[in-house]
């Protein structure tokens, strides 16, 4: 019986508190019902916070902020349990003029109070957002770039339907507009109580520029840009030759800005170069099909990354609170049976002057480890890379707790003269970047300065104003000395300023 009385009493108190709590409604400019607004770098987030109360409520201030947070959760393998981290890497505060507050600071019943706000999505975080230890300055530069929204299915939308952004449940990057109504019970300004708080999520896809290509060794366990295979007549038959398949990192895929035109085509192309070194007078194998897949790898940690994460050390991470989640998306299947081989003879290639040399397939595809003769064949296959519209892709980024990288997986099959039940194939794993571009005609991350502005700022003469009471005469102008400094003397040298 006492427990039931306690339950009813707490329920009544909760209902009274809910009744007395101010109601906050956040409306954004260009808000579409049922969808989350999306923004990119330099975009303005404009809106209004509206407050209503059911009874007169005294308050002291309204706090309107634009916040960016990152959250991770990692399962430990060495010890049972879970560890994680939470980081607020961005907090912008909207100043509110005192004229917008009622006098006295009391919300009256039956009235609606409006507080407008404006935030600009930055393209870089403040340095204190990444204050942990780093192996080099490039990591710090990457960690202070604004990361994209990640992991929230309510935000990965194309404007019509919810899309998967290939992120696990163990990590999330969120942005929201938060409005809080505070009251200070005492005279101390540090002691405040939140009467009501509300938040509205927004999606942020910042402008991320292309980074230099990755530099890795041939022994790298993650990427493989060169593959050699023996081409045989059959399972128990002799060898026809040696096949070399290579590919380099393609140009990045440029993602359209948020709410971009539907007609925008997100694509790039990868080139696969092949070389066949025959044993004797054997002809190269006939090519079959090329499959392309995109592997998205999400790295997350309970502690800040000191260096760029890599999947090669994933097995050593679980006991220190780090993890990796990878998902593969099929891209295309292309028949390349019509690709033509070009015959070359090593004896016909003479060394020429560097000014006359041109790039050739021979320089792109080096010979195999065991070339058999002076004759070889080369071929190239261009593979278009287009991202499917059924997924929400975020640009490649690295932050203190979460990173996202992409790998392009290519597999090409070929046919030998003797029919096989299963066609042999060669596979490559090539790094690829996804970058986001600014809106057409919008403000980009680059600052355009004309040459006239540069000349006016750096090469115009400086004048020092002199008053009547000045004890010293003005120094000579730069224009008066410029001709003397650059004028050669009789001995062929240059005069100094003191000799002019």
Image (tube, rainbow, N blue to C red):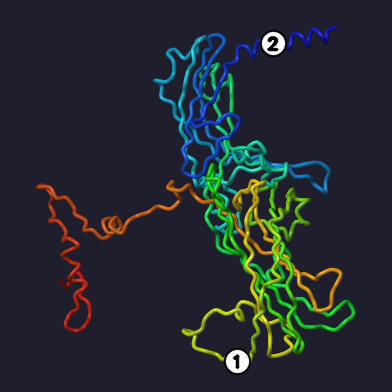
| Relative image position of residue 272 (x, y in whole percent) | 65, 70
Residue appearing at x 47%, y 15% in the figure: 105
10 Å neighbourhood of mark 1: few (<14), some, or many (≥20)?
Answer: few
Give left or right: position of 407 versus 229. left
The quadrant of the picture occupied by the N terminus is: top right
The residue singled out by tag 2 in the image is: 13
Front residue of 468 and 139: 139
10 Å neighbourhood of mark 2: few (<14), some, or many (≥20)?
Answer: few
Residue appearing at x 78%, y 11% in the figure: 7
Image vertical order of residue 274 relative to residue 309, above or below: below
The quadrant of the picture occupied by the C terminus is: bottom left
Front residue of 251 and 299: 251
Residue appearing at x 72%, y 58% in the figure: 311
The label nearer to you, 2 versus 1, is 1
Pointer 2 or 1: first along the chain: 2
Residue appearing at x 71%, y 67% in the figure: 428
Give left or right: position of 94 versus 420. left
- The answer to whether residue 266 of the structure is visible from this angle is yes
| Relative image position of residue 362 (x, y in whole percent) | 61, 81
Front residue of 228 and 451: 228
- The answer to whether residue 401 of the structure is visible from this angle is no
The residue singled out by tag 1 in the image is: 348
Q: Secondary structure at mark 1?
A: helix
Q: Which mark is residue 368?
A: none
| Relative image position of residue 345 (x, y in whole percent) | 64, 89
> Disc 2 versus disc 1: distance between alpha carbons?
94 Å
């Amino acid at each position: 019986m006492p427990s039931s009385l306690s339950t009813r009493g707490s329920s009544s108190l909760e209902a009274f508190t809910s009744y007395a709590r101010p109601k906050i409604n956040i409306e954004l400019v260009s808000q579409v019902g049922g969808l989350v607004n999306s923004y990119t770098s330099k975009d303005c987030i404009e809106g209004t916070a509206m407050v209503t109360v059911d009874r007169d409520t005294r308050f002291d201030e309204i706090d309107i902020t634009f916040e960016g947070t990152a959250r991770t959760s990692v399962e430990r393998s060495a010890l049972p349990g879970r560890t994680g981290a939470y980081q607020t890497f961005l907090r912008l505060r909207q100043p509110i003029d005192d004229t917008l507050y009622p006098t006295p600071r009391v919300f009256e019943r039956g009235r609606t109070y409006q507080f407008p706000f404006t935030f600009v999505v930055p393209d870089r975080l403040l340095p204190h957002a990444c204050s942990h230890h780093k192996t080099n300055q490039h990591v710090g530069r990457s960690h202070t770039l604004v990361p994209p929204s990640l992991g929230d299915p309510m935000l990965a939308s194309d404007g019509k339907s919810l899309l998967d952004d290939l992120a696990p449940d163990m990590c999330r990057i969120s942005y929201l507009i938060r409005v809080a109504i505070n009251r200070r019970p005492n005279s101390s300004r540090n002691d405040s109580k939140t009467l009501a708080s509300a938040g509205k999520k927004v999606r942020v896809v910042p402008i991320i520029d292309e980074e230099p290509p990755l530099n890795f060794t041939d022994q790298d366990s993650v990427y493989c840009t060169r593959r050699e295979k023996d081409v045989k007549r059959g399972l128990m038959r002799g060898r026809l030759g040696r096949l070399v398949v290579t590919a380099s990192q393609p140009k990045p895929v440029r993602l359209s800005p948020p709410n971009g035109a539907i007609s925008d085509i997100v694509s790039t192309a990868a080139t696969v170069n092949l070389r066949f070194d025959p044993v004797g007078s054997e002809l190269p194998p006939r090519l079959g099909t090329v499959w392309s897949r995109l592997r998205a790898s999400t790295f997350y940690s309970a502690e800040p990354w000191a260096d760029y994460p890599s999947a090669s050390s994933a097995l050593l991470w679980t006991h220190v609170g780090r993890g990796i989640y990878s998902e593969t998306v099929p891209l295309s299947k292309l028949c390349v049976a019509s690709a033509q081989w070009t015959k070359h003879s090593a004896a016909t290639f003479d060394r020429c002057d560097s000014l006359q040399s041109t790039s050739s397939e021979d320089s792109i595809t080096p010979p195999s480890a065991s070339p058999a003769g002076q004759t070889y064949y080369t071929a190239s296959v261009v593979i278009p890379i287009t991202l499917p519209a059924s997924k929400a892709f975020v640009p490649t980024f690295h932050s203190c707790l979460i990173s996202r990288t992409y790998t392009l997986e290519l597999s090409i099959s070929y046919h030998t003269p003797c029919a096989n039940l299963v066609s042999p194939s060669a596979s490559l794993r090539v790094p690829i970047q996804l970058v986001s571009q600014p809106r057409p005609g919008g403000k980009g991350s680059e600052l355009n300065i004309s040459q006239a502005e540069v000349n006016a700022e750096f090469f115009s003469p400086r004048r020092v104003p002199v008053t009547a009471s000045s004890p010293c005469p003005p120094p000579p102008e730069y224009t008066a000395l410029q001709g003397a400094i650059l004028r050669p003397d009789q001995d062929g040298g240059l005069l100094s300023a003191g000799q002019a």
